[in-house]
């Protein structure tokens, strides 16, 4: 007996108690229906019936007709009624067979059949959850971002205005000034989206702002370029928060995904805000217009009354002309689009950490370990030779090889640099196919790869020693200091890999990326042009050889070191800097501290511009490479030894 309520004897069944299907053999498809009140007939029928017939008379109900007939019960008065289907998974009989999985109707939703009710349409049967999408982009794309806040819009507008006013005259502290409101816009957007401020997010953000100090301190363009690129990568990681290798690699450039969607998101938010607060825009515009008018009028009066105040205003206010209008407008759009892209990324970043990385097929112990053991033996043999050279002296090696001291140093560094890079690739591939069945396999992996890492550190030290010999022979240049810095960073990465093998590797991706950003920051703050000039001046003081022509191509960072040279070399090296600084006088926000210091030195002790006191330019040529600066000339030790251009003995340093 079903637990569905039935009509009492002698009482007409209510509409909710009408049978869903009639017994087989009924002439009219079922017993005669009792008359219903007109109000009940006029009630609208629900359209989402699972058992409503199609217009052609066919039912879309997936239940078989036999089950329909079995669901019709007869009450004590002999009237048929529809039994309520048991719930899904409920026992239905002696065999406890599971009931139909289709949803049942509540009593007040009992279907009504008949021509007076019209056709009934049913939704498709329940098919379960949709299968996951095969697109990798769907797996990393987040939900749509929260609506943009007014604080984000105001910060983006401030960034755009500062970009148009400050970035058109060069790079300096203006980059840091522009970055502050852009960072605030991203912070407000992340706060509105409910994101938490994590320690790594703070580290990336602080690192990005610190990298922008390099353009404010250094006048060299190449460390500035590296610092700006590293700052963009660190800022993008602060917005994404990657932890894995795909998260760190793609997260560092993932902000560019919002270059188009960011401005669209900001425009929609602006329209929504403007539509709901039209009455508040008028007072804001009027207040801003009145304040600007007062500043212009009284500022002009005070500037005309006092020359010192006029000079102060001239230094503080950017010099904007109509000729620069298109360029300034482009900078405005660039600042606005970049800030909105960063804000949208902060509100809804791509989840690069969700990218699946399939592990390589684990190899057998012998197949995996034998090549690496052979490689370790080769590294050990090379290091043994290096130790023999170190303790036995270079004279024996040079006599046996026929190479000069400088050629031996130059030949070895680049090969060792490539050996270090290839070793890192070998370690990465070895970890992908390493055996990992048990504790013995893990011990084998740590022993073999740990030995390779330690031997690679010795190779790094040997490469740096070769570079030191190279610099002693030819002098320090930009290329040489750059690759030496890169070799030092590769050694640091190997140390991090060793630590990850001992402590775990979850932190390794972020540590490697953080070490790269820190290396760029230290490299920029150390002022490589200053180091180059100082090393070459020291070499001149000990050997009497210097390449003045190469030193002229350095930035203003080199002026303090070159100021230590004796005349006439000092004037020969500084006259180019003096003429360049005299013709370029940028505003304070586009001038580096190194340029200010160089201008102060040359104003205190101007360089002698008499070219007759310097050798002819062709004397600096010879076999010097334009980028390496391998040529040098023998300069006199002091002004007393200088008799004219004929006393300069140009040399190549190749002997």
Image: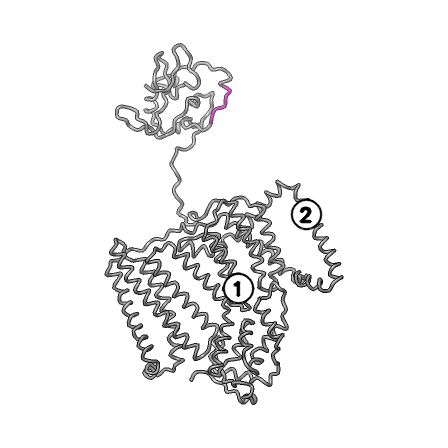
Q: Quadrant of residue 51?
A: top left
The crowd level at tag 2 (other Cα within 10 Å; few <14, some 14-19, many 20+) is: few
Q: Is residue 42 magenta?
A: yes
| CB atoms of marks 2 and 1 within 8 Å | no
Q: Which residue is mark 2?
A: 285
Spatial separation of the CA atoms under disc 2 and disc 1: 38 Å
* Residue in the picture at 45% in, 53% down: 200
Left or right of 137 in this view: 373 = left
Q: Quadrant of residue 376?
A: bottom left
Left or right of 83 in this view: 301 = right
The residues colored magenta run 41-46
- Residue 88 horizontal/vertical position (percent): 34, 29
Q: Which residue is mark 1?
A: 214
Which disc, if any, is residue 500?
none
- Residue 176 horizontal/vertical position (percent): 56, 59
Q: Quadrant of residue 309?
A: bottom right
Q: Is residue 357 magenta?
A: no
The kind of secondary structure element at disc 2 is: helix
Q: Nearer the viewer, residue 350 or 514?
A: 514
Please, which residue is most extreme toward the left here?
A: 366
In the image, is residue 372 above or below residue 549?
Answer: above
């Amino acid at each position: 007996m079903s637990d569905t309520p039935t009509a009492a004897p002698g009482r007409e069944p209510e509409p909710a108690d009408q049978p869903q299907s009639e017994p087989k053999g009924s002439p009219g498809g079922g017993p005669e229906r009792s008359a219903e009140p007109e109000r009940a007939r006029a009630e609208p029928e629900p359209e989402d019936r699972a058992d409503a017939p199609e217009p052609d008379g066919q039912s879309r109900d997936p239940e078989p007709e036999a089950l329909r007939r079995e669901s019709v019960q007869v009450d004590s008065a002999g009237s048929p009624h529809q039994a309520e289907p048991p719930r899904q998974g409920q026992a239905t009989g002696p065999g406890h067979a599971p009931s139909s999985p289709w949803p049942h109707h509540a009593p007040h939703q009992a279907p009504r059949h008949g021509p007076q009710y019209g056709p009934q349409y049913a939704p498709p049967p329940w098919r379960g959850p949709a299968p996951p999408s095969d697109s990798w982009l769907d797996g990393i794309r987040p939900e749509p971002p929260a609506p943009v806040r007014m604080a984000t819009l105001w910060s983006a507008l401030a960034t755009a205005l500062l970009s148009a006013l400050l970035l058109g005259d060069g790079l300096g502290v203006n980059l840091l000034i522009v970055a502050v409101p852009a960072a605030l816009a991203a912070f407000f957007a992340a706060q509105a989206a409910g994101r938490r401020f994590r320690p790594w997010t703070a580290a990336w953000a602080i690192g990005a702002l610190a990298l922008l100090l390099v353009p404010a301190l250094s006048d060299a363009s190449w460390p500035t370029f590296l610092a700006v690129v590293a700052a963009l990568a660190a800022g993008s990681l602060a917005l994404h928060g990657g932890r894995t290798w795909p998260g760190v690699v793609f997260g560092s450039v993932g902000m560019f995904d919002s270059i188009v969607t960011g401005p669209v998101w900001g425009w929609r938010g602006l329209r929504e805000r403007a539509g709901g607060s039209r009455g508040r825009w008028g007072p804001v515009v009027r207040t801003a217009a009145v304040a600007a008018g007062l500043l212009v009028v009284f500022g002009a009066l005070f500037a005309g009354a006092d020359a010192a105040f006029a000079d102060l205003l001239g230094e503080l206010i950017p010099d904007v002309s109509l000729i620069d209008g298109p360029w300034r407008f482009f900078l405005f759009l660039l600042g606005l689009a970049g800030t909105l892209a960063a804000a949208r990324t902060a509100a809804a970043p791509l989840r690069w950490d969700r990218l699946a990385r399939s592990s390589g097929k684990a190899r057998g112990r012998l197949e995996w370990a034998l090549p690496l053991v052979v490689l370790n033996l080769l590294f050990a043999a090379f290091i043994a030779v290096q130790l023999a050279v170190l303790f036995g002296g270079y004279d024996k090696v040079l006599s046996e090889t026929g190479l000069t001291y400088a050629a031996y140093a130059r030949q070895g560094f680049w090969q060792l640099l490539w050996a270090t890079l290839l070793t890192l690739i070998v370690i990465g591939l070895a970890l992908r196919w390493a055996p990992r069945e048990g504790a013995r396999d893990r011990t084998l992996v740590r022993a073999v790869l740990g030995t390779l890492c330690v031997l690679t550190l010795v190779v790094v030290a040997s490469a740096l020693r070769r570079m030191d010999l190279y610099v002693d022979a030819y002098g320090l240049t930009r290329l040489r200091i750059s690759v030496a810095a890169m070799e030092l960073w590769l050694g640091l990465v190997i140390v991090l890999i060793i630590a990850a093998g001992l402590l775990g590797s979850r932190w390794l991706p972020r540590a490697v990326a953080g070490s790269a950003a820190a290396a760029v920051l230290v490299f920029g703050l150390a002022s490589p042009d200053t180091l180059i000039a100082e090393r070459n001046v020291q070499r001149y003081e000990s050997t009497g050889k210097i390449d003045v022509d190469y030193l002229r191509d350095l930035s203003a960072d080199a002026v303090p070191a070159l100021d230590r040279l004796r005349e006439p070399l000092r004037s020969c090296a500084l006259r180019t800097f003096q003429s360049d600084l005299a013709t370029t006088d940028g505003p304070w926000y586009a001038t580096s501290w190194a340029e200010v210091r160089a201008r102060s030195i040359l104003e205190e002790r101007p360089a002698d511009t008499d070219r007759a006191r310097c050798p002819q330019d062709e004397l600096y040529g010879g076999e010097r490479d334009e980028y390496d600066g391998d040529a040098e000339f023998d300069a006199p030790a002091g002004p007393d030894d200088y008799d004219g251009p004929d006393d300069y003995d140009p040399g190549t340093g190749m002997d």
